[in-house]
Image (cartoon, coloured by chain):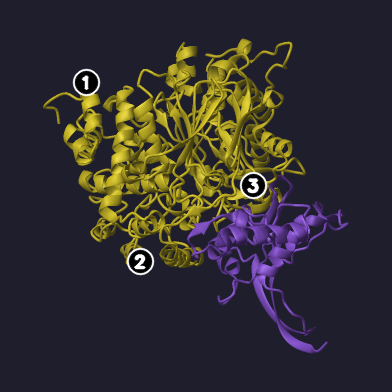
Chain colours: A purple, B yellow
């Protein structure tokens, strides 16, 4: 496959600066509401502050790829005397937890870096400077990126099986036509 | 669709366990906005004045404000209302933290508790699923520890929990409701919660809060955000560091406590120690603080960090804020700040107000020294040791007794006012720092301050720190400083206020107590009160509004933000009218419970130099300005002007308002 140059957008997280306010969650959910800014719901946010206040853990994590299966990672990391489980750092929407899933549908959520904006709004809204937007160029293999609908349907297929989804879609489209 | 508010309250009957999700009348938002405003209305409608604080009919309302859950920075206050066991008036302590937003996301504006549960319970609200759960295993647990225990038990790490500790269970009049890094502390909300046998309230919500005109709202927020950045980069010059910034006083950041320790009174609000801030004490305090504050933390959606996650010398983590950092040291007359860090941990788990409680303990120490309390009162029993002799040990011992209502602690637990009367034998004279039966800041000052005189006397909050804020505490010494200060002051309700400040001098004709003149004082105090009333209706932290100099939120941007959020078309006049309506209704609730002009008095020794005639003039002028009669009751005319005709009728029927009285 051909190598292409790709702009990699990412958010660098300085967790030590996090004051735990969750402004990032609020602005993310507001930006992604339809119409834009019409509703706020941190449970729909693509960035979440994982916190254990009395363990001094405040850790913003933004949503990465959807994964259909649980991983084996159940390791414990001790950093600066604080215990984190491996899931704490993981950005995936996966079957083993509720993180990064639409509360209504359970469909996976993924950070899109607030496409169309100069930089992700969580970065703009974090006045504690925890989140820093970074762009860099990398050479990567060319790949065909699946559309959002495809990712969503894929996750439903993983959960319920292809047959059930196909049947449901067929039944619904018939009902709609009728 | 409802905007900004959810349009639903939870009604919990603790006697029967009945839970209802009740749609609210949209008219309520139009007339009282939300938060404190709509809660006051419910108390007026549903709690007759005969109801005593520990009667089953006393309502405990946990309320969000209109802007909680929206992107408005610092909209995170939860207001708790109830008839206070200490003052017997309608109290409204508030907490920051994370609770109110979670309640909104769960789909509720208020949780209204009535009656009493036969056994200990906690309420679990998970969106539409709401249940009362057994809490017998949590009895005796600390207020902070309970929050984590409930989260673990429910397997809900993201649930927000408000809980009481043993002090609340034992109905200590200064018991707080603790939640995350915050607490609703004053006037005994924890006691009322304990009386109803509610150990905790846990909430998790994953629903939407809707904005009527979201894009417009965000445009207004850009201005607010820019101003927050500006103020954080530009502290106000020529005022005490603690007053120079925005947010709650940055007690977790600043280590210089010369001002508090030398200007506030130690012990039972008695002694000013003008030479306290020595090099040695400064080193001790700085070391204790910097070594203990592990992280600066904020409340929900707030860019400031007024709280600290602390652990003293490897002790357990807990969260600290504001003036609580030093109140126990000052009450106990202990110079070592480490003592405060140790005892506040225990006090937080007990769940007690860190303003009132140290004063109660110091009051007991004074009574012992005066021979009014004796060794017998400080003796041990089969379950606890006798009181140690040292200052620190004595305070720990007294705190234990008060929280558990053991021995003398059972009397002290009712607060200084009530305890003094129960003890008698001259103890009443030691109750020298209360207003309306409630402990005040330990301030003993020189010259009468007319603005503070009015705020102390007349506000329903009965706590100066949540009334003051917009106006500098003292005049700037030079004309240049004043000109510099007024140059950039967009928060002013009207330009003519600038002249008041320019002419305000430290000494001479234009100084306290005669300047600002009574008329000017009325305008200034009314402005401060109005802004706090908006804050408390919308759930914005007064640290970003009413409580600080040149705040991000003010009367000129509030109407725009609120209108974009809830779809109303409010301007400054109509917004002021709404909060004025609620404020007068609150006063009427208290008038109906017997509050009169005679109660509106700061402590006799609050200032050394008093001016009885001028004070009476100030009070009368203010009453008139507010549209109240000379007994401090809103007049019929005023009530009608605020569409509160039904209140006038009720007050007349009860003989509180009489025909022809102004």
Q: Which residue is labeled 3 in the image?
A: B285
Left/right placement of residue B441 relative to residue B662 reads right
Res B443 seen here: yes
Q: Determine whether the residue tagged by mark 1 lies in a helix, strand or loop.
A: helix
Q: Nearer the viewer, residue A103 or B248?
A: A103
* Image spot of residue B504 (x, y percent): 28, 54
Callout 2: residue from which chain?
Answer: B
* Numbered badge on residue B488: 2
Q: In which chain is the residue bearing label 3?
A: B
User: Of circles 3 and 1, which is in front?
Assistant: 1
- State the CA–CA distance, disc 3 to disc 1: 58 Å
Q: How far is mark 1 from mark 2, CA to CA?
A: 50 Å
Q: Which residue is mark 1?
A: B653
Q: Chain of mark 1?
A: B
Q: Which of the marked residues, 2 or 3, is nearer the chain's N terminus?
A: 3
Marks 1 & 2 on one chain: yes
- The answer to which quarter of the image holds residue A112 is bottom right
**A117 vs B468, nearest the viewer:** A117
Q: Secondary structure at mark 2?
A: loop
Crowding at label 1, few (<14), some or many (≥20) Cα neighbours within 10 Å?
Answer: few
């Amino acid at each position: 496959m051909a190598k292409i140059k790709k702009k990699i957008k990412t958010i660098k997280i300085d967790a030590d600066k996090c004051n735990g306010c969750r402004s990032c969650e609020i602005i993310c959910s507001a930006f992604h509401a339809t119409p834009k800014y019409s509703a706020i719901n941190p449970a729909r946010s693509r960035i979440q502050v994982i916190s254990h206040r009395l363990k001094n853990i405040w850790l913003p994590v933004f949503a990465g790829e959807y994964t259909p299966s649980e991983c084996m990672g159940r390791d414990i990391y001790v950093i600066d005397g604080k215990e984190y489980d491996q899931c704490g750092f993981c950005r995936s929407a996966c079957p083993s937890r509720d993180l990064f899933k639409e509360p209504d549908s359970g469909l996976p959520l993924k950070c899109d870096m607030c496409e169309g904006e100069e930089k992700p709004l969580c970065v703009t809204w974090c006045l504690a400077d925890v989140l820093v937007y970074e762009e860099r160029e990398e050479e990567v293999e060319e790949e065909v990126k699946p559309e959002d609908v495809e990712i969503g349907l894929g996750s439903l297929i993983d959960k319920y099986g292809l047959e059930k989804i196909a049947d449901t879609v067929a039944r619904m489209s018939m009902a709609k036509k009728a | 669709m409802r905007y900004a508010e959810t349009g639903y309250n939870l009604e919990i009957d603790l006697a029967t366990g009945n839970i209802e999700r009740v749609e609210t009348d949209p008219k309520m938002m139009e007339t009282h906005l939300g938060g404190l405003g709509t809660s006051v209305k419910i108390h007026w409608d549903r709690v007759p004045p005969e109801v005593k604080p520990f009667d089953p009919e006393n309502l405990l309302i946990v309320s969000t404000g209109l802007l909680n859950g929206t992107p408005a920075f610092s909209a995170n206050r939860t207001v708790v209302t109830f008839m206070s066991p200490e003052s017997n008036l309608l109290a409204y302590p508030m907490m920051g933290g994370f609770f109110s937003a979670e309640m909104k996301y769960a789909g509720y504006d208020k949780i209204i508790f009535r009656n009493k549960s036969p056994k200990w319970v906690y309420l679990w609200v998970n969106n539409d699923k709401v249940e009362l759960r057994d809490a017998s295993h949590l009895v005796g647990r600390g207020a902070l520890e309970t929050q984590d225990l409930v989260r673990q038990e429910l397997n809900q790490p993201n649930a927000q929990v408000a809980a009481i500790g043993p002090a609340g269970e034992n109905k200590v009049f200064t018991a707080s409701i603790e939640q995350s890094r915050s607490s609703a502390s004053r006037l005994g909300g924890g006691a009322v919660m304990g009386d109803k046998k509610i150990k905790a309230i846990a909430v998790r919500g994953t629903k939407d809060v809707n904005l009527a005109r979201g894009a417009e709202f965000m445009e207004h927020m850009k201005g607010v955000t820019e101003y927050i950045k500006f103020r954080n980069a530009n502290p106000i010059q020529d005022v005490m560091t603690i007053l120079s910034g925005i947010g709650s006083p940055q007690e977790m950041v600043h280590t210089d406590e010369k001002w508090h320790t030398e200007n506030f009174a130690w012990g039972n609000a008695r002694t000013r120690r003008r030479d306290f801030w020595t090099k040695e004490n400064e080193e001790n305090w700085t070391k204790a603080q910097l070594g203990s504050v592990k992280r600066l933390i904020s409340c929900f959606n707030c860019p400031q960090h007024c709280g600290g996650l602390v652990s003293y010398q490897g002790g357990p983590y807990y969260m600290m804020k504001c003036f609580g950092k030093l109140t126990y040291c000052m009450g106990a007359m202990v110079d070592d700040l480490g003592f405060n860090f140790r005892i506040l941990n225990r006090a937080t788990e007990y769940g007690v107000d860190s303003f009132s409680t140290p004063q109660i303990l110091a009051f007991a120490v004074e009574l012992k020294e005066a021979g009014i309390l004796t060794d017998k009162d400080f003796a041990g029993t089969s379950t606890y040791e006798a009181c140690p002799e040292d200052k620190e040990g004595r305070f720990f011992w007294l705190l234990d007794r008060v929280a558990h209502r053991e021995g003398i602690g059972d009397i002290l637990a009712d607060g200084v006012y009530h305890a003094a009367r129960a003890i008698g034998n001259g103890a009443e004279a030691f109750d020298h720092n209360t207003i309306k039966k409630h402990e005040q800041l330990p301030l003993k000052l020189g010259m009468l301050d007319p603005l503070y005189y009015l705020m102390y006397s007349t506000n329903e909050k009965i706590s100066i720190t949540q009334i003051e804020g917009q106006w500098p505490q003292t005049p700037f010494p030079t004309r240049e400083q004043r000109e510099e200060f007024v140059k950039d002051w967009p928060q002013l309700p009207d330009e003519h206020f600038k002249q008041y400040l320019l002419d305000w001098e430290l000494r001479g004709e234009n100084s306290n107590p005669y300047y600002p003149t009574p008329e000017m004082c009325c305008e200034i105090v009314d402005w401060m009160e109005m802004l706090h009333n908006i804050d408390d209706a919308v759930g914005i932290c007064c640290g970003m509004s009413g409580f600080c100099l040149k705040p991000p939120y003010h009367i000129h941007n509030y109407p725009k933000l609120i209108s974009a959020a809830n779809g109303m078309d409010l301007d400054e006049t109509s917004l002021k009218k709404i909060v004025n309506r609620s404020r007068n209704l609150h006063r009427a609730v208290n008038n109906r419970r017997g509050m009169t002009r005679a109660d509106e008095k700061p402590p006799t020794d609050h200032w050394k130099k008093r001016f009885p005639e001028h004070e009476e003039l100030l009070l009368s002028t203010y009453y008139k300005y507010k549209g109240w009669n000379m007994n401090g009751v809103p007049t019929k005319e005023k009530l009608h002007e605020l569409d509160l005709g039904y209140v006038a009728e009720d007050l007349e029927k009860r003989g509180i308002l009489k025909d022809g009285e102004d």
